[in-house]
Image (cartoon, rainbow, N blue to C red):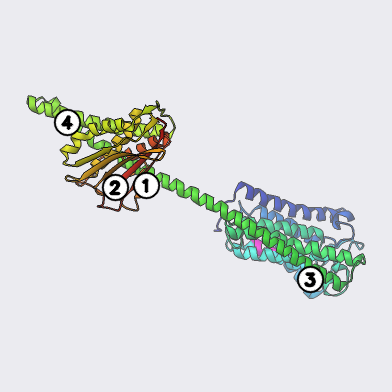
Amino acid sequence: MLPSMPGRSMKGSSLIVAASAVAVLCGAIGIVGWLFEIRGLLSIPDGAPGLSPLSAVGLVAAGAALMCAVRSPRSMQLLGLVVLAIFIVAAAGYMTGSSFGLGDLPSDVARGAGTLPGLPAPNSMIAFGCIAIALVSMPRHPTIAQSAMLLAFVIAYLAALGELFGASLVEGLSAYSAMSPQTIVAIGALTLGVLYATADAGVMPLVMDRGVAGLAVRRFLPIAVGLPVVLGGLRVAGEVAGLFDTRFGTALMAVASAALAGILTIDIAIAIRDLDQRLGREHSARAIAESESRIKNDVLSLLTQELRTPANVIHAQAHLLQAGVLTQERTQQVVETVSVNAARLRQYVDDAMEVASLAQGGLLLEPLDVDPRDAVRAALDAWASRIAQKGITLTSRLTPSGIVRGDPARIQRIAGNLLSNAVKFTSSGGEIRVETVRDGDFVRLTVADTGVGIAADFLPYVFEPFRRSGALVDGHVEGLGLGLAIVRHLVELHGGSVTASSDGVGHGASFVVRLPSVAA
């Protein structure tokens, strides 16, 4: 059982059908011209080598075979055997010097040197043999099919150049290169069709490659095929017109070839550079998308972990309350536990919503002339009991530093989040230092601690949302990693800046906020 040909895209299948139709049409025109003795259909254009009846039949068979390539490989091979039979008959005729009584062209139709009546020209015969090999071998050996078809194309290409330059009209070996234009066109179409029908094998993956290799082939190949035609035609035309002799024509052709090769090299280099840049942009975009996907997964994991803890506590305590077996004192403890965890859960949600609002520009300030020391004192008062409970020493030095145009509640939030971060990462016996000072046209707020510090590789990401340091206090650090992200957004809304510094893990951390001051 024959393997089916690989599926082609709609564009590829249409091209194969179109190539097949061209070959069938070229052959059919010759058959009609021979049957009805229409000289104009046998020699196109007038004076060109004519298409023999046997060649016409071969072109129709080859075109029909290629049309079966995708849907019926067996039919393609059977029609390929018809083309092979034409090659065998022609070869036997040339070896025996007999045309076997096959129909011949009219006597006034040109034919190539050495062509026997009724038989294809010698080069056409060899081309038909190559076409037959391509059609028969295509289902199982696509690389062989490509090689055979490309050889047929080279033969037809040589014949086309011979006709263009008038080589087939002179004596000698060049006269044997004659081939009818119909055969040349049909072989070109068949070559294109076979290559597309075997696009997954041989040279085609290289031609269709989206990378640099494919780009170079697609840019260079058309020039390599077409350049000799253009330059050779110009040279022959110049010599025929008497503009220069053969030697000078050869020199001109060499110079023109070198110049065009240089231009082509530069063009390919530019195209490769553009492709590299495009691929680089695609790679960067893909890397960003993958990074965003990883961050999204990390965020979901973090949200699941941090939200589950207070939710589970609330759920468990609610079951105890529903059981109705607790003492009044124990009930009060359970209610307090539920309240604390509910507040914690709400804080997580509020932080996440605030970050989203800040990122989208949906948070508006209510600016006033504010003494930043008042906002810092309010934050210190809010955290005083927690700091004392944890056994941390607090040192504050709030010197007169100027007036800031800002939202008092948001400035207090900035100081509060920095204090929260310091308390979270500083163990019992540690120290937190808070100070405000004048710094040129800015008010500088510093919150420093002697806590676990920040690793050097994490420091660039410390203000990114949902990013948490791996340094832990008491085995676990609560929170979604949003506090410092909120600080950064709020500071930037006030036209200021915030920086973080640390000498590494175990050496504490320092956060410095600079807000622009206004004239008193």
User: Which residue is rendered at x = 20% and y = 47% of the image?
Assistant: 475
Question: In the image, which is nearer the foreground, mark 4 or mark 3?
Answer: 4
Q: In this view of the protein, which residue sits in the foreground, 211 or 21?
A: 211
Looking at the picture, which amino acid does disc 3 mark? Answer: Gly
User: Please, is residue 476 above or below residue 154 in the view?
Assistant: above
Q: CA distance from mark 4 to mark 2?
A: 32 Å
Q: Is residue 35 left or right of residue 200?
A: right
Give the crowd class for mark 3: few <14, some 14-19, many >=20 residues within 10 Å.
Answer: some
Q: Which residue is mark 3?
A: 93
Label 3's element? Answer: helix
Question: In the image, which is nearer the foreground, mark 4 or mark 2?
Answer: 2
For the C terminus, give its image quadrant: top left
Residue 114 spot, x, y in % from top left: 84, 72
Q: CA distance from mark 3 to mark 1?
A: 84 Å
Q: Which residue is mark 2?
A: 509
Label 4's element? Answer: helix
Q: Which residues are magenta?
A: 131-135
Give the crowd class for mark 2: few <14, some 14-19, many >=20 residues within 10 Å.
Answer: many
Q: Is residue 343 left or right of residue 65?
A: left
User: Please, is residue 428 above or below residue 94 in the view?
Assistant: above
Q: In this view of the protein, which residue sits in the foreground, 436 or 264?
A: 436
Q: Main secondary structure of the magenta part?
A: helix
Label 1's element? Answer: helix
Q: Earlier in the sequence, mark 4 or mark 2?
A: 4
